[in-house]
Image (tube, rainbow, N blue to C red):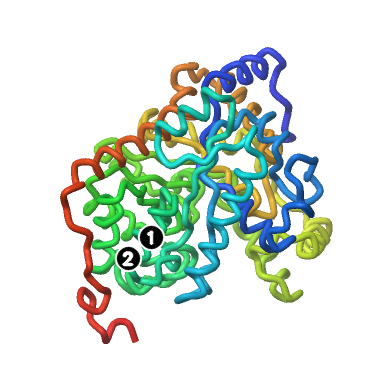
Amino acid sequence: MAYQAPAADLLDRARALLARYPVVDGHNDLPWALRMQVDYDLDRLDLAEDQRAQLHTDLARLRAGGVGAQFWSVYVPSGYAGDRAVSATLEQMDCVRALAARYPEDLRLAFTADDMEIARGQGRIASLMGAEGGQSINSSLATLRSLHALGVRYMTLTHNDNLPWADSATDKPVAGGLTRFGEEVVREMNRLGMLVDLSHVSPDTMRDALRVTTAPVIFSHSSARAVCDHVRNIPDDVLESLAANGGVAMATFVPKFILPEAIDWTAAADANMEANGFHALDTTPEAMVVQRAYEAAHPRPMATVSTVADHLDHLREVAGVDHIGIGGDYDGTAFTPQGLEDVSGYPNLIAELLGRGWSEADLSKLTWSNAVRVLREAEGVAGQLRGTAPSIATIEQLDGAAEQA
């Protein structure tokens, strides 16, 4: 069925709600897109101008979408290792700070839940940082602490490949979840007040992290596995555990994660990209020429706003309305759903949910309150642990040197 734009009255209500309770989006890969396209030269991709030909994100579209807070992903590929991964993460963080400095009337760096509320009161977009993949800490708790000191407020434990201390959802299990060092990473994140992000990790890693953590966790960009059986999504038993944990599952918009028919199509498109010399996740203009040519020859199954809403309905039913959010993954995916083509599309999603009978109180939790609460509660746990000494454990001490070979 072709996508139909929401009725005007629902769209008006959605925009009015977002003016009061704007979207906290859990994951946007704009910093990496800026690295790949212009080597962080913000004069060449000025977000104050219309960038729809190059990006999913610019300032006008963030405003049109009702975005009030953004976790910018300071992502580096899982193929980056050691000092290279650490340095690239720092460069990504520098990009986020440069964006906030360049556009101070629109963006405000945020490090706490209070900062998010202050930014909302000022009419600015709270800009937070989330590290995507534990390769960013190079198996070093001191590096983890340094990232937190510099402003990172969540870390996704893995990206697409296993780490020595944690299994990824998209790799062959080795550790069976978290190793002893992986558990220590979670405990140190709790002590710091850094959110444990369980997107990308295997179900056993999810369960291990939930067993170990004393603070709420997040899934910064994952949807419901019962609705679309993709390994990147969250099984129902894990969703059911979020209420006791206090965590938040932030639904993503990536078509291959939300639409079953898109899984095989995307695998074939990825293979075509690699055959043409591009990484499957490459969204540079040159790579997108290849993607669009493949799409023209092999029309893709189309996800829509309704597809995302189906996932949110399920997440609300299983996890509860206090434990859901939004994490679009814009500028980190080649394809997006109809009606959610870029960051201006959030009102379409809220209008869809209003049409399904969601109350404005529930929607305010989805868009704003749940995400602010989960960061505040993580800060509270850190406050309780303030007298606890930083861990100086090493991966060799906890997991043994042989396992690291």
Residue type, mark 1 in image: Ser
The label number, if any, that marks residue 48 in the structure image: none
**Disc 2 and disc 1: Cα gap in Å?**
6 Å
Residue position for label 2 = 142
Q: Quadrant of the N terminus?
A: top right
Residue 48 vertical position relative to residue 396 in the rendered view, above or below = above
- Residue ID for mark 1: 146
Q: Residues within 10 Å of mark 2 (few under 14, many from 20)?
A: some
Q: Residue at x 37, y 38 (%)?
A: 375
Label 2: which secondary element = helix
Q: Check contact, mark 2 vs mark 1: CB within 8 A.
A: yes
Residue at point 46%, 70% (across, down): 161
Tell me which amino acid carries mark 2. Ala
**Residue 69 located left or right of residue 49:** left
Residue 191 coordinates in the image, percent (x, y): 25, 51
The residue closer to the viewer here, 307 or 57, is 57
